[in-house]
Image (tube, rainbow, N blue to C red):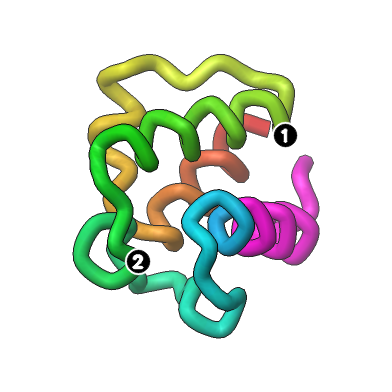
């Protein structure tokens, strides 16, 4: 089973790097689009970064449902 703290730290670091925001802004309830300013291209790049970081495939249907940092962390923990 995946270590929640490890997954969370990796997700936060990835999002901060990809969206060029501070890690403090990347909270569990932060919305990629509303709070972190991601556009549709940014969200596609984030999904690809998560796939690479965690060595898994994320379907387009699943990717569309990932709107917040917390949802993404829960999704990845469930897949690992």
- The image shows residue 10 at horizontal and vertical percentages of 72, 54
Labelled disc at residue 36: 2
Query: To which quarter of the image does residue 6 belong?
Result: bottom right
Labelled disc at residue 42: none
The alpha-carbon separation of the residues under discs 1 and 2 comes to 20 Å
Q: Residue at x 47, y 79 (%)?
A: 25
Labelled disc at residue 53: 1
Image quadrant holding the C terminus, namely: top right
Residue furthest bottom in the image: 24
Query: In this view of the protein, which residue sits in the foreground, 64 or 2?
Result: 64
- Taking the image as shown, residue 1 lies to the left or right of residue 67, namely right
Helix, strand or loop at mark 2: loop
Q: Earlier in the sequence, mark 1 or mark 2?
A: 2
- Taking the image as shown, residue 30 lies to the left or right of residue 76, namely left
Residue furthest front in the image: 20
Q: Residue at x 54, y 26 (%)?
A: 48
- The image shows residue 73 at horizontal and vertical percentages of 53, 53
Q: Is residue 13 magenta?
A: yes
- Taking the image as shown, residue 60 lies to the left or right of residue 13, namely left
Tag count = 2
- The image shows residue 5 at horizontal and vertical percentages of 75, 65
Magenta segment: 1-14
Up-down: is 22 above or below 70?
below
Up-down: is 68 above or below 57?
below
Which secondary structure type mostly characterizes the magenta part of the structure? helix
Task: Report crowding for label 2: few under 14, some 14 to 19, many 20 or more residues within 10 A (C-alpha).
Answer: many
Task: Report crowding for label 1: few under 14, some 14 to 19, many 20 or more residues within 10 A (C-alpha).
Answer: few
In the rendered structure, are the residues bearing label 1 and label 2 in contact, judged by CB atoms less than 8 Å apart? Answer: no
């Amino acid at each position: 089973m995946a270590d929640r703290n490890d997954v969370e730290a990796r997700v936060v670091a990835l999002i901060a790097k990809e969206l060029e925001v501070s890690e403090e802004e990347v909270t569990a309830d932060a919305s990629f689009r509303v709070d972190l300013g991601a556009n549709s291209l940014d969200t596609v790049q984030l999904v690809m970064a998560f796939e690479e970081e965690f060595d898994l495939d994320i379907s387009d249907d699943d990717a569309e449902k990932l709107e917040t940092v917390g949802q993404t962390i829960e999704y990845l923990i469930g897949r690992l």
